[in-house]
Amino acid sequence: MSEALGDLLDLLDLERIEEDIFRGRSRTAIVPRVFGGQVAAQALVAAGRTVPAARTPHSLHAYFLRMGDPDAPIVYTVDRIRDGRSFTTRRVVAVQHGRPVFHLSASFQTYEDGLDHQADMPPAPDPETLPTARESLPRYADRFTGPEIAERLLEARAAVDLRYAGEPPYATPGEPRAPRSQVWFRTNGKLADDPPPGAVWGDPLLHVCLATYVSDMTLLDSVLLAHGRGGWAVGDVVGASLDHAMWFHRPFRADDWLLYDQESPTSSGGRGLGQARIWTRDGRLAITVIQEGVIRVPR
């Protein structure tokens, strides 16, 4: 396991300060706010710690209410909405400085057999043939708003091996392309099959929380591609996540390659919509993701 991945796992290991109240911290941010994937993953950790281990998340729906302060702790309060025979529902509110910054509803299910079908996995290049972030980001340093941006991106993504199947938006600003993007990702190191001694959560919740963390990194790329925008790194748009939804269909491991196939069906009114499917390398549809974000052109 890489040091960066160990740090990310520590970030997700929330402090329990009451039965249904948890406290988390943030890592150094690329921009002066908490990374949305972090707060979503931490909120799911908080919810999961109040649910029997036999029940795993099958969906989450979340709203980003305010920019989080990366220098202040985040308090997560869990509301036990329902504990049924097969399903468990939790609501989580994340608070900073006395105000809610994030809201999550999550549903958990005990595994059961049922009808089973899925769409076909789209074609994609083999992940090992694609350049790593360390190999590719320096190529675009002259496009970024500052010489430190590439290193800040590398630091923020050090826990995750994320490889673009095509050119990222910041590679070709000013050139509109099809509103579709693919990335392969996995954690930068293997995760234990069993949780270590003293761990409060384990497999498969950990893998779901890590995928939730990564899901906010690139989902709106396809919106930028449609308009030839490079994103915040090149300074031609400003934006933030508004809401985020995920459905977890089949078991997966976050330390095995996962294909994040993303597209944008529309953007309007200062908002852009991204939708995606996440596939295991052997072709199983693991997750569906939809997100809307604010995307504005600086004046």
Image: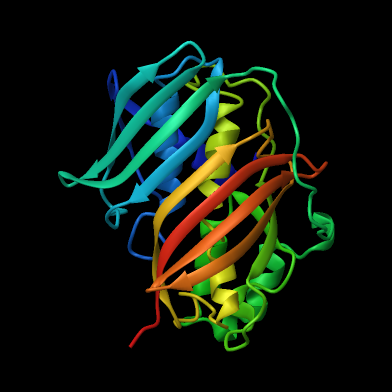
Q: Quadrant of residue 74?
A: top left
Please state which of residues 84 and 45 is positioned toward the viewer in this rendering.
84
Total marks in image: 0
Q: Quadrant of residue 265?
A: bottom right
Horizontal and vertical percent for residue 75?
Answer: 27, 37
Horizontal and vertical percent for residue 23?
Answer: 30, 34
Q: Is residue 43 left or right of residue 257?
A: left
Q: Is residue 175 above or below residue 242?
A: below
- Position of the N terminus, as image quadrant, is top right
Residue displayed at 29% across by 18% down: 19
Horizontal and vertical percent for residue 173?
Answer: 58, 85
Q: Quadrant of residue 18?
A: top left
Q: Residue furthest left?
A: 98
Q: Residue furthest top?
A: 85
Please state which of residues 120 and 212 is positioned toward the viewer in this rendering.
120
Q: Is residue 9 above or below residue 272?
A: above
Residue displayed at 51% across by 80% down: 147
Q: Residue furthest front?
A: 115
Regarding residue 181, the answer to whether it shows in the image is yes
Horizontal and vertical percent for residue 117?
Answer: 76, 35
Q: Is residue 216 above or below residue 195?
A: below
Q: Is residue 136 left or right of residue 142?
A: right
Q: Is residue 263 left or right of residue 31?
A: right
Regarding residue 11, the answer to whether it shows in the image is no
Residue displayed at 52% across by 29% down: 57
Residue displayed at 54% across by 21% down: 109
- Position of the C terminus, as image quadrant, is bottom left
